[in-house]
Image (spheres, rainbow, N blue to C red):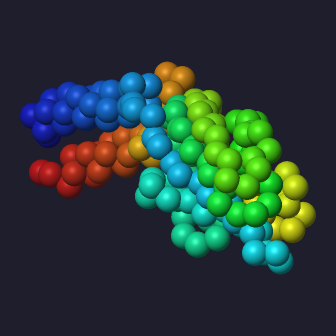
Amino acid sequence: MKTVRDHALPTAILLLAAILASALPTASAQETVEVDIETHSDGSDFWFECSGAPAVCGDGRNPTLTLEAGRTYAFHVTNPSNTAHDFNLGGAIGETTALLDPGAEATLTVTVPAGASGDAEYWCNPHRSSGMKGALVFASADDGGNDNGSPGPGALGLAGALLGALALARRARP
Ligand SMILES: [Cu+2]
């Protein structure tokens, strides 16, 4: 009993430290993620398409866009349609391109705030009421720590489960 406890506690502390260390620094020193956005319209429907970044782009028209807290993204927006559009990112970002005439393009580079979470929206100002908009989801880095120095719920939950498993294992042994 004594021997098992002597090994289990230091092991748990080491694993906990490793989990927290791996969760914390990931968001700060990463490369900019390049995302291609196209604006479209066919006279009755108005929509965005997203490509080039599988972790960001959902499928189809006006897809859900998923952005990681603390990351920097360069949205390359092109307008191959015959109507002017812009591209607005809401929620914790609050940035927009200029209004892009047919054939025009712009790059919108944004860094997602470290504490960003939850759902927001992206949209085109002229056609937001016509449905040219989609969901913008802010995810925490690696489902673990965020970028402001405190562990996220993912890391804490994993550490808690680990300690619980160790306690059970300890109890089960003779
Ligand atoms: Cu539009």
x then y, percent, for residue 97:
73, 40
Which residue is rendered at x = 60% and y = 38% of the image?
107
x then y, percent, for residue 79:
67, 55
Q: Is residue 142 left or right of residue 172?
A: right
Q: Is residue 89 left or right of residue 28?
A: right
- The residue lying toward the viewer, choosing from 103 and 148, is 103
Which residue is rendered at x = 46% and y = 41% of the image?
33
- The residue lying toward the viewer, choosing from 52 and 111, is 52
- The residue lying toward the viewer, choosing from 77 and 102, is 102
Total labels drawn: 0
x then y, percent, for residue 142:
41, 44
Residue 140 seen from this side: no
- The residue lying toward the viewer, choosing from 30 and 88, is 88
The quadrant of the picture occupied by the N terminus is top left
Q: Is residue 158 left or right of residue 8?
A: right
Q: Is residue 76 above or below residue 55?
A: above
Check the image and name the residue furthest to the left: 3
Which residue is rendered at x = 44% and y = 25% of the image?
28
x then y, percent, for residue 165:
29, 50
